Each structure stands twice: as C-alpha cells, then as structure tokens.
Amino acid sequence: MESALARLGIVGNLYKVYRAAIELGDVPVSKIIERTGLPKATVYGALDRLEHEGLVAESNGEGLRRVRANEPGVLLEHVEARKQMLTEVLPQLRAHYYRAQGKPNIRFYEGEEGVRTAYWESISGDAGELRAVFSMAELMEVPGLPVVDEYMAERVRRGKFMRVVRSRSHDRAHIWQSSHAELRELRYAPAAIELSMTFVIYGSRVALMSSAKECYGLIIESEEYAQMMRAMYESLWLQSEPTPYID
C-alpha cells in the first residue's frame, strides 16, 4: 500500500498521517500525533495538505480539532483529476521540450482512436485562434457528429475562436454555421478546390485527421511547418466565400 500511494505523492510523513487517519476513524488530532509519533507541527502540516487534496476532513468538536479520512474511493477522483490536468498541459510541455531541442515533433496515431486523439489535441495549448479545414463527409463518419459536437462545446468553453473552410461538395448537413456565440466563422472554398481531409492549425502545431478509409491522426509540432501552413491557409481563406452569421 505504501508503494502504491507513493506513486500519488503520498509519501513519508504524509503517508504515515494518512494511514493513521484511515485506521483510527473520526478522532481528535492528538490521536493521530500519538499513533504516528510525529511532531505536532508536522502532523498539522500533513493534515492541511491531505485536506486540500480531499483525502481527509477536519472539524471542531468539544474544543478539540478532529479529523477523519474520507472514503478511500476519493483516490480514484484524485487520480482522474491529475490525469486530466496532465492531459491539458502535456502538449504545452512537449512544445517547449521539442522547441529547445531545435527539431520538429511528429506523432502518428492509427485507427479511429487516433483520429479522435489528434482532433481533441487541436484545442490544447494557448493558441486563441484556430485555423481549420473541415471535411464534413469524413468527419460525420470518423469521429462522428456526437464527438464533433462535444469538441465544439469544449472549444467554446475554452474561448478559442475558429476560422473554418469547407467544401460544398463534402458537406452533408447545414450545421456549424458562422456564429458569434459559438466563436466560429465559416467560409466555403471555391468549387474547383475539393477539401477531403480535416486539419487544424493551432500555434506551432498542425493536427491532421484522415478519412475512415485511411483512418489516422497526425500531429506535427514545427514552427516552420506551421508558419507555411498558415500562409497557405490565409491564401485559401481569401479565395473562399464568406457566409452570414446566424446570430
């Protein structure tokens, strides 16, 4: 148990205090001090941290400061919260790492899960505006409308504006129009330009999602590549037909 909890950062005196709290139940803090044999200040410091993590709860009763461990299942929530936090910050850490190395970072993901991975990562990082090409027919197959709608909602929640170009020949539904509320401006590419693949340019990264036929996701972290893609995108944007806002 000690080894497993150490992987969550519950080590040393923190582990001793947490284990005592689990074993003793709802008790005065003095009992925790007695069980662990640790100095009073050390125990109080550990309890403050454990309470901040949601692992114990403290109360005052009959002039005594009492403590009880929360149901251990809260550890799963603790792990999930840390995982979510790391998932959000990992792309930024990678970007800094590879920038320092002076070389691009290319990640290839196979299958439908790979498409979803690349798609979701395109709203990570600190880029406030996303430049996108959406191939509607392909998106409706993989990753599918429910995933795209969830992605759109999360993008709006994070306050990221999206400029998107689509091909009328690949449209399958009159949805995802230009909208102030949904932070999106839509344009249609000239009829001679057929956009059959989805990609998103965000900061120094480009996420590409294939059709269900080839079924892969690709993320390229490279300032030079992203800069070239932005230049090509702006040329396409200027050629494309604006659409009215629905709100």
Image: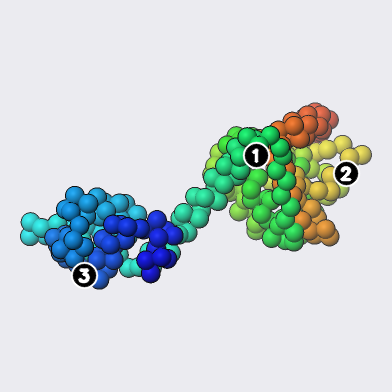
Residue 210 lies, with reference to residue 193, above or below; the image says below
Q: Which residue is mark 2?
A: 194
Q: Is residue 87 above or below residue 32?
A: above
For residue 226, say whether it is visible. Answer: yes
Q: Secondary structure at mark 3?
A: helix
Q: Label 3 amino acid?
A: Leu
- Check disc 2 and give the amino acid type: Glu
Q: Residue at x 57, y 47 (%)?
A: 90
At a point 57% along the width and 42% down the height, the residue shown is: 93
Residue 238 sits in quarter: top right
Residue underneath mark 3: 24
Image coordinates of residue 181 in percent, x first then y, are 58, 39
Q: Position of residue 34 (x, y in %)?
A: 15, 63
Residues packed near mark 1 inside 10 Å, few (<14), some (14 to 19) or many (20 plus): some
> Which residue is drawn at the image coordinates 68% and 56% (left, top)?
116
Q: Position of residue 9 (x, y in %)?
A: 40, 56
Crowding near pointer 2: few (<14 within 10 Å), some, many (20+)? some
Query: In the picture, residue 188 is in which quadrant?
Result: top right
Q: Which residue corresponds to mark 1? A: 98
Classify residue 25 as left or right of residue 94. left
Gap in angstroms between the C-alphas marked 1 and 2: 33 Å
Label 3 packing within 10 angstroms: few (<14), some (14-19), many (20+):
some
Dot in front, 2 or 3:
3
Sequence-wise first label, 1 or 2: 1
Amino acid bearing label 1: Tyr
Give whichever of discs 2 and 3 has the lower sequence position: 3
Tell me the quarter of the picture where residue 123 sits: top right
The residue tagged with tag 1: helix, strand or loop?
A: helix
- From the viewer's perspective, is 152 left or right of 19? right
